[in-house]
Image: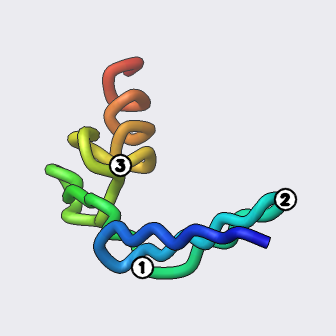
Amino acid sequence: MKSQVHRDGMMFNWITENHEIALGFKRVLRGKCSECGKKIPFGNTICDSCFKKDKEISKK
């Protein structure tokens, strides 16, 4: 049985004929909400709760 091991930073992938095992740590980019400072996915500017508040205010 042949197996391959790939390393990408702290991620290790073992690949065999029928299986693949991934183990390690992956860095996740996070941003901050411009309103409250809560951590949100990278690329967004405000969180969902702040967006709902702004949406309710704009309806009035």
Please name the residue that numbered disc 2 is placed on: 18
Q: Amino acid at mark 1?
A: Phe
- In depth, the one of 42 and 32 nearer the eye is 42
Q: State the image coordinates of residue 51 (x, y, percent, origin top left).
A: 37, 38
- Indicate the secondary structure of the residue bearing disc 2: loop
Q: Amino acid at mark 3?
A: Cys
Callout 1 environment at 10 Å: few (<14), some (14 to 19), or many (20+)? few
Question: Quick check: marks 1 and 2 in contact, CB under 8 Å?
Answer: no
Query: From mark 1 to mark 2, how far is it between C-alphas?
Result: 24 Å
Please name the residue that numbered disc 1 is placed on: 25
Residue sitting at the far right: 18
The answer to whether 34 is drawn above or below residue 2 in the figure is: above
The answer to whether 34 is drawn above or below residue 23 in the figure is: above
Query: From mark 3 to mark 2, how far is it between C-alphas?
Result: 41 Å
How are the colours assigned in the image? Answer: rainbow
Q: Amino acid at mark 2?
A: Asn
Query: From mark 1 to mark 3, how far is it between C-alphas?
Result: 25 Å
| Nearer mark to the viewer, of 3 and 2 | 2
Residue at image coords 73%, 65%:
16
- Picture quadrant of residue 31: bottom left
